[in-house]
Image (tube, grey):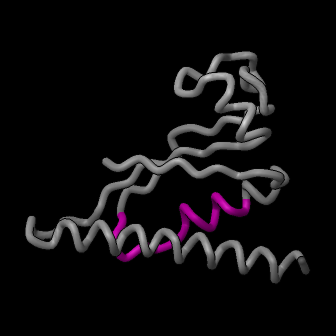
């Protein structure tokens, strides 16, 4: 299993919902079993919106990053032979990047911004 954390700054909850639907619903070539495992909103201070300490970050880290939403996903790479594993990892990262850009471009076209 591979974990992937995406950070969003300044996006409305409706956008995040549309993003998640498009991201989870995408038919990836190199990825299988993509699932959301957590979502948090941080107000830009030491504590998150629920008043819980983020155990992975110190106060300076949260202050620097500011208000944001973080969504964590987990996925598996489709199986390949060991000699191709590194190539598959690179292809997987490139595919995720491409899909994220496509979702962003589609969102810009439909919102008119």
* Residue 28 part of the magenta-drawn span: yes
Asked which quadrant contains residue 107, the reply is bottom right
In this picture, is 110 found above or below 11?
Answer: below
Name which residue lies at 75% across and 32% down. 63
* Residue 29 part of the magenta-drawn span: yes
Q: Position of residue 74 (x, y in %)?
A: 42, 48
Q: Position of residue 32 (x, y in %)?
A: 35, 62
In this picture, is 6 found above or below 40?
Answer: below
Q: Position of residue 86 (x, y in %)?
A: 21, 67
| Badge count | 0
In-front residue for pair 109/20:
109
Name which residue lies at 38% across and 56% down. 33
Which residues, given as a range, are shown in magenta? 18-31
Name which residue lies at 73% across and 62% down. 18
Asked which quadrant contains residue 44, the reply is top right
Name which residue lies at 75% across and 21% down. 50
């Amino acid at each position: 299993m591979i974990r992937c954390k995406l950070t969003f700054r300044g996006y409305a909850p409706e956008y995040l919902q549309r993003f998640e639907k498009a991201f989870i619903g995408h038919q990836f070539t190199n990825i299988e079993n993509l699932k959301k495992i957590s979502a948090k909103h941080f107000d830009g201070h030491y504590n998150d919106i629920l008043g819980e300490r983020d155990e992975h970050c110190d106060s300076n880290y949260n202050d620097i990053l500011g208000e944001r939403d973080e969504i964590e996903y987990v996925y598996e790479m489709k199986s390949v032979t060991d000699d191709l594993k590194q190539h598959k990892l690179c292809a997987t990262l490139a595919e995720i990047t491409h899909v994220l850009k496509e979702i962003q471009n589609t969102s810009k076209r439909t919102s008119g911004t």
